[in-house]
Image (spheres, helix red, strand yellow):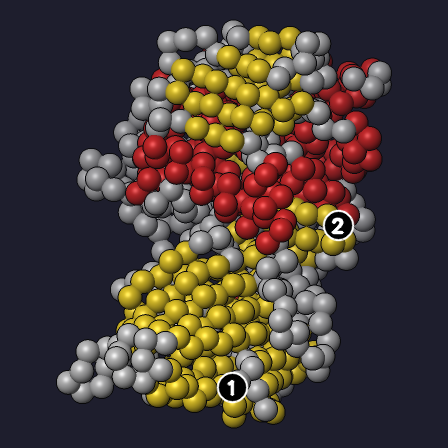
């Protein structure tokens, strides 16, 4: 069975079968605008029969060409070849072309069947198809309209095609083509849903181009750094990353001038605190404007009051945002703040952007938001005043049970014997993010002459690091607990979370070797990547979402952390395994894949129902590049460290037009030869020796040295 085809542009996406039709009422297929399904059926027939698929040719993320041949008449060869060139954006456009390869004229009836249920994305996911009565369909000339009231809000979709005859639920074309001739037509779909900007009943623009990002994508690519390597799988992965991250850009409700990165299609085409921030942190060598836009977008919705329904609190960064009509089950259905990691990640990203030379005024504008975030950490994040950030485990409708990145299941955090951990839980990686956030704020203060804030934040980071290593380190196991439970007992399962702690630098160097070896042991490393959970853990399941699968973003962060502490070969093994896995997925890393050993299955085993494209998976190869180059800018101190350690699979790697402040650099690395850097301003010192293991890799701070 051929895979579904996903076309995406901003908050609009369309998922169809490989032949182009949408013929079932599943939660997945359809055309969605702002999380509302505006096409639930879209089927083309010729003389009442579905054409036989020949090929599907994908181009940009928002376009595809579906090629088929018409079902032949009895005893004859097929002579009609159909092309359906589809684009999505503010709407959908389908350009039809039928070629007659017969020496005789051809006459036939072509029909486009259409329906719209206007169900919310999450209503569908829960098996509900809401609405105040059935859809109402009207036909007039060559225009078909389908409308429905959902939760008191009017929705409408308009479908027009010049030359067609609209009847209930269909557009009909009576076609005559001469021998060897061609027939063409265009069908335009325009939807009015909350947030789409179009009122019900407004006339559709018959000649509108539905690709609002068409020119924006061109601008994205023109500003995107060039990349070249003889390691073909990496080259393909980087190409997919460029395309997918460009497609996952969205504008913010009420602030169309701000562009941010969405989490992924089809489930998370929205501003998403943790995912958007981690994606931004990973993509910095290739683009800094989208991460800055993401910060500005999140700052605009930063918590201002306490609301037990949405879990909003002053200074808190949101978990995710949804549009009206989506059926989003969390919070009030629009914005949900239930997360503990997005808030420190916000401060981390702000600090990193300044290290990459972002505009000082832009950074200064966001400093009050960073301070509000740190105040949330101290006032609301630390539930019991012990200096750690915790969260309650809540098994209630309308809330997430867990509030960090392993939030996909109610039993995501458990002991090695399989017993679920009871809260409040203090997760290991969250303490690392908070540590890095304090260091980032200390540096921001230092460069502005604010010695009091710099000292206070550096001391808080130092105290947290000591507390973390004292309470999370399991000396008899040689690794860190994944969490402390509500009794402050270490949750002893061997998990990938501690790799994030390497990335943020909170792990003591004396313990780092044992951590590195555990992460690359056969218990954790599959050959393609590090599992979320060790095989020796009672709850391990290689085909589960978070009990043993392999997540590309998780692995990219782990590789960066290993490299930071000087474990070059460990980091290289993860980089090679992950890029090998990408090649089996045609260059596009999925959200996750199963955690089976490479010795058991020579190819990575696909995990069903994951997002694709998915933002932090798309950004993972970008962080791999930074890791292998050991690329560390510090525009505050006017230094740039580049000390490449390319693995055997990667003999060379070049970046061109890489943004750094107001400059654009070319970095050429080749195994066995010194790195070459062109375009570096004379006042920036180039350092070609790697930083010491204690030197922060992603969020350095001289204030804590």
- Residue at 52 percent across and 7 percent down: it is 689
User: Which quadrant holds residue 652?
Assistant: top left
Residue 134 appears in view = no
Query: Relative to 20, does residue 228 appear above or below in the rendering?
Result: above
User: Which quadrant holds residue 190?
Assistant: bottom right
Residue 406 appears in view = yes
User: Which quadrant holds residue 427?
Assistant: top right
Q: Say if mark 1 contacts mark 2, CB within 8 Å.
A: no
* Viewer-side residue, 474 vs 300: 300
Looking at the rendered image, the quarter that the C terminus falls into is top right
- The secondary element bearing badge 1 is classed as loop
Q: Where residue 485 sits in the image (x, y, percent)?
A: 53, 38
Looking at the rendered image, the quarter that the N terminus falls into is bottom left
For this orientation, the residue located farthest to the left is 75
Foreground mark, 1 or 2? 1
Q: Where residue 273 sits in the image (x, y, percent)?
A: 63, 46
- Residue at 51 percent across and 41 percent down: it is 242
- Residue 164: numbered disc: 1
Query: Relative to 474, does residue 34 appear above or below in the rendering?
Result: below
- The secondary element bearing badge 2 is classed as strand
* Viewer-side residue, 74 vs 695: 74
Separation (CA) of disc 1 from disc 2: 38 Å
- Residue at 51 percent across and 35 percent down: it is 483
Q: Which residue is mark 2?
A: 257
């Amino acid at each position: 069975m051929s895979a579904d085809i996903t076309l995406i542009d901003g908050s609009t996406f369309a998922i169809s079968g490989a032949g182009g039709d949408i013929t079932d009422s599943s939660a997945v297929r359809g055309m969605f605008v702002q999380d509302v399904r505006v096409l639930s059926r879209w089927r083309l027939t010729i003389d009442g029969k579905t054409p036989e698929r020949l090929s599907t040719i994908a181009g940009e993320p928002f376009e595809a060409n579906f090629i088929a041949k018409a079902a032949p008449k009895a005893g004859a060869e097929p002579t009609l070849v159909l092309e359906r060139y589809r684009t999505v954006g503010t709407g959908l456009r389908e350009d039809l072309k039928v070629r007659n390869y017969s020496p005789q004229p051809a006459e036939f009836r072509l029909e486009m069947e259409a329906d719209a249920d206007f169900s919310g994305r999450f209503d569908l996911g829960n098996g509900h198809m809401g609405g105040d009565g059935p859809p109402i369909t009207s036909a007039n000339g060559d225009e078909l309209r389908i409308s429905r009231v959902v939760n008191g809000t009017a929705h409408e979709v308009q479908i027009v095609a010049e030359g067609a005859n609209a009847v209930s639920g269909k557009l009909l074309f009576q076609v005559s083509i001469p021998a060897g001739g061609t027939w063409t037509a265009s069908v335009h779909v325009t939807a009015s849903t909350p947030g789409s900007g179009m009122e019900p009943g407004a006339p559709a623009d018959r000649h509108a181009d539905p690709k609002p990002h068409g020119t924006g994508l061109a601008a994205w690519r023109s500003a995107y750094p060039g990349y070249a390597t003889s390691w073909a799988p990496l080259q393909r992965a980087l190409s997919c990353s460029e395309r997918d991250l460009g497609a996952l850009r969205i504008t913010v409700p009420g602030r169309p001038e701000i562009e941010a990165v969405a989490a992924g299609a089809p489930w998370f085409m929205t501003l998403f605190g943790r995912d958007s921030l981690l994606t931004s942190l990973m993509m910095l060598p290739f683009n800094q404007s989208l991460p800055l836009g993401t910060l500005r977008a999140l700052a605009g919705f930063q918590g201002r009051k306490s609301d037990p329904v949405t879990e909003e609190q002053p200074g808190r960064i949101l978990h995710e945002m949804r549009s009206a009509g989506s059926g989003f089950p969390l919070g009030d259905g629009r914005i949900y703040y239930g997360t503990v990691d997005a808030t420190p990640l916000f401060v981390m990203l702000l600090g990193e952007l300044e290290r990459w030379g972002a505009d000082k005024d832009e950074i200064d504008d966001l400093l009050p938001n960073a301070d509000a975030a740190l105040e949330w950490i101290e006032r609301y994040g630390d539930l019991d005043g012990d200096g750690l950030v915790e969260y309650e485990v809540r098994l209630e409708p309308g809330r997430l049970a867990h509030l960090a990145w392993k939030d996909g299941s109610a039993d995501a955090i458990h002991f090695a014997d399989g017993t679920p951990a009871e809260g409040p839980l203090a997760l290991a990686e969250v303490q690392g993010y908070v540590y890095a956030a304090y260091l980032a704020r200390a540096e921001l203060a230092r460069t502005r002459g604010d010695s009091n804030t710099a000292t206070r934040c550096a001391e808080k980071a130092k105290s947290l690091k000591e507390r973390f290593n004292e309470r999370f380190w399991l000396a008899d196991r040689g690794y860190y607990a994944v969490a402390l439970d509500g009794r402050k007992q270490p949750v002893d399962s061997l998990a990938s979370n501690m790799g994030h702690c390497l990335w943020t630098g909170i792990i003591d160097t004396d313990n780092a070797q044992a951590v590195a070896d555990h992460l690359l042991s056969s218990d954790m490393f599959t050959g393609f990547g590090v599992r979320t959970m060790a095989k020796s853990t009672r709850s391990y399941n290689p085909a589960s979402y978070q009990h043993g699968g392999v997540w590309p973003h998780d692995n990219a962060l782990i590789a960066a952390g290993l490299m930071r502490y000087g474990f070059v070969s460990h980091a290289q093994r993860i980089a090679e395994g992950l890029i090998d896995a990408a090649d089996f997925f045609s260059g596009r890393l999925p959200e996750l894949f199963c955690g089976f050993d490479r010795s058991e299955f020579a190819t990575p085993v696909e995990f069903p129902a994951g997002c694709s494209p998915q933002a932090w998976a798309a950004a993972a190869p970008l962080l791999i590049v930074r890791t292998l180059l050991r690329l560390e800018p510090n525009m505050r101190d006017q230094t740039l460290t580049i000390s490449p350690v390319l693995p055997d699979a990667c003999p060379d790697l070049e970046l061109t037009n890489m943004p750094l402040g107001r400059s654009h650099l070319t970095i050429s690395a080749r195994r066995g030869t010194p790195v070459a850097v062109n375009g570096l301003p004379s006042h920036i010192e180039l350092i070609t020796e790697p930083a010491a293991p204690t030197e922060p890799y992603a969020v350095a701070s001289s204030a804590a040295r």
